Image (spheres, grey):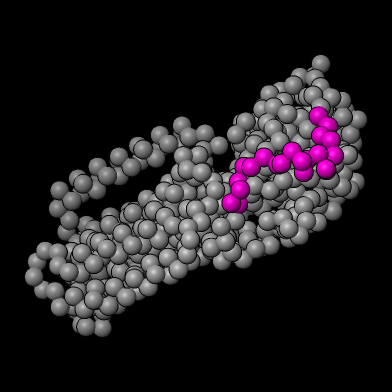
Amino acid sequence: MPAEALFSDLRGVATVAYLGAAVLFILSLGGLSNQETARRGNLYGVIGMVIAVVATAVLAHIMKWNATAWGLVAGTVAVGATIGSTLAKRVAMTAMPELVALLHSFVGLAAVLVGMSSLLGTDHPTGTGALVVHSLEIWLGVAIGAVTFTGSIVAWAKLKGTLSGKPLLLPGRHLLNALLVLTLVGAAVPFVQDALGHASPGPGLAFWLLVGNSVVAGLLGVHLVAGIGGADMPVVVSLLNSYSGWAAAAAGFMLGNDLLIVTGALVGSSGAILSYIMCAAMNRSIWNVVFGGFGANAGAAPPSGEAAEQGEVQSATPEEVAELAKDARSIVIVPGYGMAVGRAQHLVNDFSAQMRARGVNVRYAIHPVAGRLPGHMNVLLAEAGVPYDIVLEMDEINGDLPETDLVLVIGANDIVNPGAETDTSSAIYGMPVLQVWKSKHVVVFKRGMSAGYAGVENPLFFHNNTLMCFGDAKASMEGIVAALRG
């Protein structure tokens, strides 16, 4: 068979493989939208990625890569696979949000490096129009990648606790953001002009402009995420997921890889849709999240004078909570980040299993922004083995709360704050919340009386039907489970 015919056949096979991988990625996203099909969705994604890698290797082979290139690729894949598998085995579920943010940064950095490589390479399109488009792809890809990279690093530091959850509200911050964006747009003109006229080998003005582009975009990413309060971090993680998708799509344009373009667009659009859904769940716009500086007083304790005006705090021991549970016929459990920090999900599942064995109707109520990551609580409960059919979303269970005997709020705060419905001066006013105060009894598990991540005082703690069970969530649940068994 002539070499040209073999080349054409192999390229056709790779194209079909790319199409099949893209379909599998779509099926993967569909599967991941539901807990019961998440495993199948993950499997589709893995198969699609294997097909994509093999197809790319075939294309690389017909482009006559040498042994050195193959050795570098194989070594890089081996190192990356080792690091990834080690992290997957060792990282705690409580550290999953910051790990996801860190992984997003790698996608952004990859887009920056691909842009630099594309500019310095020799494989450029011919014709002025095509070269202008290619140069703009590089410029935009590096800008998106740099914003994603530095923004994800800041998000990782905030979620890890290395940086404060309070937003950085610099004077004239919106003007600063606008100036950075205008700088990126304005510098694109001399970049394209030099890229069109640069014929000598080695880096020229265009390269150094691209370096400046990555620095300015990186500063923009730092400032954007640093200015977002801790209460909005679940939305920020979702937004960064969207950014990483668009960065991957931009890299696909630079490399001329159709599958990378499709995959990046899928991730970017799904992340944007999820961010919109989460903002709608908080009754806020996406622009308000990105530029609003919400959560400026994150973690602040309520003033003692205001607490006294609202009433007395009533506390309960784990043994007393167990007695309440024995008398209940219906129980709703509201998990929050405190449950993740205390690693109490397995004990919570033991408690619910015991109560269900007694004939009690036990269900879990999940708020869209509970935790530090979209779906954070769902992942924790699935890890503990909680049946999917008793895990309900806020809209599904809010109407049943007035007929509920007992609600256990484990490490949640802002998502059960009645002030969101009644206090017009509250920073979270208008945000839909779980109306746990309408139930017969509420028990809130907390270490102390500090405010939630939004920095907003919670009147729920002072309600007549609310009991505070102070201490570590895991220790408290251990006491309750032991009392029930005794």
Q: Is residue 22 left or right of residue 200?
A: right
- The image position of residue 428, as x and y in percent, is 69, 56
- The image position of residue 89, as x and y in percent, is 46, 33
Return the residue nearer the eye: 315 or 475.
315
**Residue 138, relative to residue 79: is it above or below?**
below
- The image position of residue 146, as x and y in percent, is 35, 58
Magenta segment main secondary structure = loop
Return the residue nearer the eye: 474 or 420.
420
Q: Residue furthest front?
A: 305
Q: Is residue 466 left or right of residue 389?
A: right
The residue drawn where x is 22% and y is 60% is: 117
**Residue 161, relative to residue 173: is it above or below?**
above
The residue drawn where x is 71% and y is 36% is: 449
Whether residue 130 is visible to the viewer of this picture, yes or no, is yes
**Residue 240, relative to residue 473: is it above or below?**
below
Give the tally of numbered discs. 0
The residue drawn where x is 42% and y is 36% is: 87
**Residue 467, relative to residue 397: is it above or below?**
above
Q: Quarter of the image containing the C terminus?
A: top right
The part of the chain drawn in magenta is 295-315
The residue drawn where x is 84% and y is 35% is: 312
Q: Is residue 331 left or right of residue 272?
A: right
Q: Is residue 459 left or right of residue 246?
A: right
Return the residue nearer the eye: 432 or 48.
432
Whether residue 119 is visible to the viewer of this picture, yes or no, is no
- The image position of residue 194, as x and y in percent, is 18, 75
